[in-house]
Amino acid sequence: MSHLKKVLLGTTGAVAICLIMLLIGEGANAILSWKQFDGSFTYKTYRIIKTALRDSPSLDSGPAYMRLLSREHLERLIPKLMALDAGLENSPYRELQTPASVVNQRDGDCLVQKPNLRRTMTYLRTNIFNPLDPPALFYDSDRTLDEEIEALMRDYGTRSVSFTSNRFGERTTLPHLASERVVLVADDSVANGTLLDDAETLSSQMQARLQQRVRQAGFRYLDIGDVALQEIARRETKFAVLSLFIDHEHLSPYGIDQVAEALNDK
């Protein structure tokens, strides 16, 4: 145990000394380059590594996960991608980020998702831009792909998913359920799930699992909001819903009778 402690202390000390030397070196470099608009030594090292990754050649053999798309290969396919009205996000190619190809649009100062999208999407394996934020390729699902684009998807795509939205620009939730009342799931990519298929998003998983659990338990189920709407229609006043409840969370005896009647009708 004492030997392990010595090794840990020695390692920690070596790391601390290296950090101190780096800070001293960065300080000296900053003083010597005071009048020059230049980056730190650490930043220059990062740029060298990033450039090396960006310029790494594509691999045309071996496992699919080792194949990296080269800049030359991608740029050769840009005209065919433009003819397909395909969009390529996380890339510098503005010709592939047209109003017809992108999935988001400006509504005043807000960036919103376009309505009635029917897209197929995949990430491309490449280091030519940002290795931690690969380009995302979108195209209309009903379009016929050129052979070279099919090869691009097959050889350098991660996986293809369906990316659709409704008339309000909201991501499609599966399975489809007809209901006047909905639960709104609001968030960033966690809720929208760009790399997820429509059936794999958070809202789709919640909808499918809730429905499955209720059915497996052998219970009939209904939306209490539907009972309230029926009561409002029957009495022709929006205040009729108050007769269903004793307080904000408990049904009245009359409300229980109405729920039981609605369940019996199912």
Image: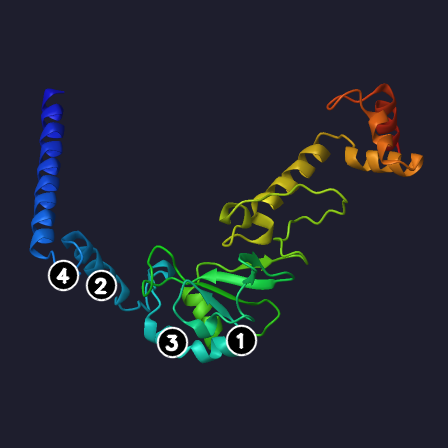
Q: Position of residue 31 (x, y in %)?
A: 8, 52
| Secondary structure found at label 3 | helix
Circle 3 Cα neighbour tier, 10 Å, few/some/many (<14 / 14–19 / ≥20) = few
Contact (Cβ within 8 Å) of mark 1 with mark 3? no
Q: Position of residue 86 (x, y in %)?
A: 51, 71
Among the 4 quarters of the image, the one containing residue 5: top left
Q: Is residue 266 visible?
A: no
Looking at the picture, tell me which residue is in the foreground, 30 or 182.
30
Contact (Cβ within 8 Å) of mark 3 with mark 2? no
Q: Earlier in the sequence, mark 2 or mark 4?
A: 4
Q: Residue at x 52, y 66 (%)?
A: 102
Badge number at residue 108 = none
Image quadrant holding the C terminus, namely top right
Badge number at residue 75 = 3
Q: In the image, what residue type sits under mark 1?
A: Leu
Residue that numbered label 4 is attached to: 36
Q: Residue at x 11, y 28 (%)?
A: 9
Q: Farthest residue in the right direction? A: 235
**98 relative to 168, above or below:** below
Whole-angstrom CA distance, mark 1 to mark 3, is 15 Å
Badge number at residue 84 = 1
Q: Earlier in the sequence, mark 1 or mark 4?
A: 4
Circle 1 Cα neighbour tier, 10 Å, few/some/many (<14 / 14–19 / ≥20) = some
Residue that numbered label 2 is attached to: 52
